[in-house]
Amino acid sequence: MINQTPLFLQPALHEKIWGGTRLRDLFGYAIPSEKTGECWGISAHPNGPAIIKNGPFAGQTLAQVWQSNRELFDNYKGEDFPLLTKILDAREDLSVQVHPDDVYAQQHEHVPFGKTECWYIIDCDPGSEIVYGHTAATRADFRQAVADKQWDHLLRRVKVKPGDFFYVPSGTIHAICGGCLILETQQSSDTTYRVYDYDRPGTDGKPRELHIEQSIDVANCPHIDPKLTYHVRQEAEAKYTELLREDLFTVSHWEIRGASSMIKKNWPFLMISVLDGSGSLRIGAEDYSIKKGDHLVVPATVEQFSLAGELDLIVSNPV
């Protein structure tokens, strides 16, 4: 029998020295400590696999179902689940970092994916900012500025507000700064190179490891802001804003204010995170309740569905 059931996921929660409590306070997650920084909501990565909560696959990890039931994912290419969706609560600044592309990650880290990502600002304190790019014209200039610790001159800081969206391709120098709550869609990778960490100690009291040479190797020099074009479509009581479409994945913001028309399959599989509100997802004659904090995968075997309620969603799929 063809599976028509969405896969609701139990996230993996991660403590971070920069984390806080908003994943509990705003989303109701059972956080492991008062310094919880990351919710890996849709994840098949070995460092934090999400567990399926419902239906015939309940109790299995998303990675297990990916391996054993590839038809649910349209027999998508590759051995590894390609994407990962997180919510990050940055009570304090994250390190200034950069991620490699696929080729560098495969050659140097022996992992399947580099890390291209993007951020949707769910909420932030007034005056919050991010580090996004740098001012060095060449790799030699970048190396010299790092060696001289010219951080105030080197790093570009950008003010943010709720609803902002940033595309962070591999090679982009970046940091989420304190006060930001962000939904991140990324390749399924946990490879991070720290170039600067404010000389702060880790949980062992020692400065955290930096990866200066790798950071210099993979940083885009010069930094160039990507040009983004949003595509907005209004249908019935739903608004669909495509935030990003690139070679690896697409990301959209869906706002449901009543009932959507039928949404027909145009994806290998669909990843949905509920940022706010509550409502229902209908597949055939079945209604599934969804609410703020839910993460789910609509498998390839679902040809169409509809949504109802008051819902704000981030929706992504691999290309």
Image: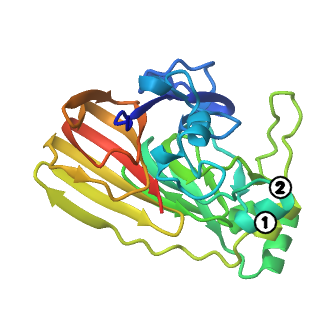
State the residue in front, 88 or 159: 88
Instruction: State the image coordinates of residue 78 (x, y, percent, origin top left).
Output: 63, 57
* Residue furthest front as drawn: 1
Q: Is residue 90 visible?
A: no
- In the rendered structure, which disc, 1 or 2, sits on the residue that comes first in sequence? 1
Circle 1 is placed at which residue position?
104
Q: Residues within 10 Å of mark 2 (few under 14, many from 20)?
A: some
Determine the secondary structure under disc 2: helix
Amino acid type at circle 1 is: Tyr
State the residue in front, 139 or 305: 305
Seen in the picture, residue 93 relative to 214 is either above or below; the reply is: above
Circle 2 is placed at which residue position?
109
Determine the secondary structure under disc 1: helix
Seen in the picture, residue 284 relative to 241 is either above or below; the reply is: above
Instruction: State the image coordinates of residue 130 (x, y, percent, origin top left).
Output: 56, 54
Q: Residue at x 53, y 40 (%)?
A: 69
Q: Residue at x 70, y 54 (%)?
A: 96
Q: Is residue 36 left or right of residue 162?
A: right
Q: Residue at x 52, y 48 (%)?
A: 184
The residues tagged by marks 1 and 2 sit, at their Cα atoms, a distance apart of: 8 Å
Instruction: State the image coordinates of residue 220 (x, y, percent, origin top left).
Output: 69, 73
